[in-house]
Amino acid sequence: MLERILAAGCDPGLGFLSDVPLSITGTMKVLLVFDFDNTIIDENSDTWIVQCAPNKKLPVELQDSYQKGFWTEFMGRVFKYLGDEGVKEDEMRRAVTSMPFTSGMLELFTFLRKNKDKFDCIIISDSNSVFIDWVLEAANFHDVFDNVFTNPAAFDNSGRLTVKHCHAHSCNRCPKNLCKTAVLTEFVDKQLQKGEAMIAGGVVDTNTALHEVLQTALIQGGPTWESCKAAKALGKCVLEPSCDEPLCVKVVEKLCPEHEDQPN
């Protein structure tokens, strides 16, 4: 679980991409970027919702209709099928909000809420806005996040959930509905223009860093703790085996100004 949490916040402001100590200056904040599926929640919301289908599985012909790069279109057909089978919004909500959070995530959100003056938090996810809203609302953590970038979804007049592409992009490596690199690059550029972006104790090549960040964050399972460069960022923050506080909280806590005494 730790690897996924580290990957979720793996950005230039976390110091994973540089050997320089971390620092926060003036109005600058540390940016934490989260995925939703298999990061905030310990499941994939799109596959989890299949439990609402008759016999908790999709027809073979529907399963076989998926085409690489067109997952959002596939999920649109899944949602239509569920609606046609009489699955109501309330049933879908109950299923989605029953997904377990990744271990330590709720504690991390509680910590971030208390330190919103130091952190900007965003979600970039290939799920959809309805599922993410349901989960954050049920756990009462909507206020932790400044922005959510995902596929917009809504229930139509027939009670079926519909989903659209997050945005249009020119990347030929990403699914048609979402390029996380493009979303994150645009967000960081806007923050830099406002003078509200994160820094990492020195000059960081933002474009290079973003690509390294996403390559790390999107690899299934993420880096191992032993090899992760976050070890240097942790500095003197060593956890005893008996410590009850989640590691992810200790990692993020280390980024606060009061913890700037990083070792060289």
Image: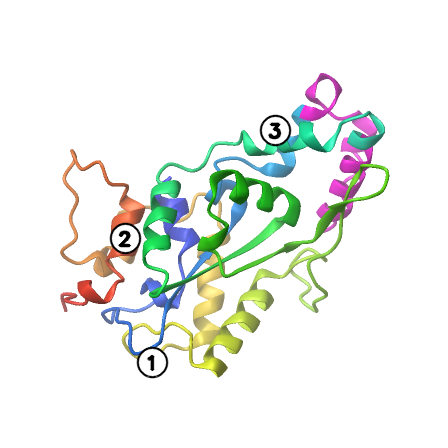
Q: Which mark is residue 203?
A: 1
Give the amino acid type for the residue marked by disc 2 in the picture: Val
Regarding mark 1 in the picture, which secondary structure is present there? loop
Structural crowding at the residue carrying mark 1, measured as other residues with C-alpha within 10 Å and reported as few (<14), some (14–19) or many (≥20): few
Magenta residues span 52-81
Is 113 placed left or right of 64 in the picture? left
Task: Say above or below: 187 vs 238.
Answer: below
Q: Quadrant of residue 54?
A: top right
| Labels 1 and 3: the sequence-earlier one | 3
Give the amino acid type for the residue marked by disc 3 in the picture: Arg
180 is within the stretch colored magenta? no
232 or 45: nearer the eye?
45
Query: What is the chief secondary structure element of the magenta stretch?
Result: helix
Tell which tag, 2 or 1, sits nearer the viewer.
Answer: 2
Q: Are marks 1 and 3 in contact (CB under 8 Å)?
A: no
Q: Quadrant of the N terminus?
A: top left
In x, y percent, where is residue 32? 41, 59
Q: Which residue is mark 3?
A: 94
Q: Which residue is mark 2?
A: 251
Task: Say above or below: 41 vs 173.
Answer: above
Q: Does the rendering let one see residue 68?
A: no
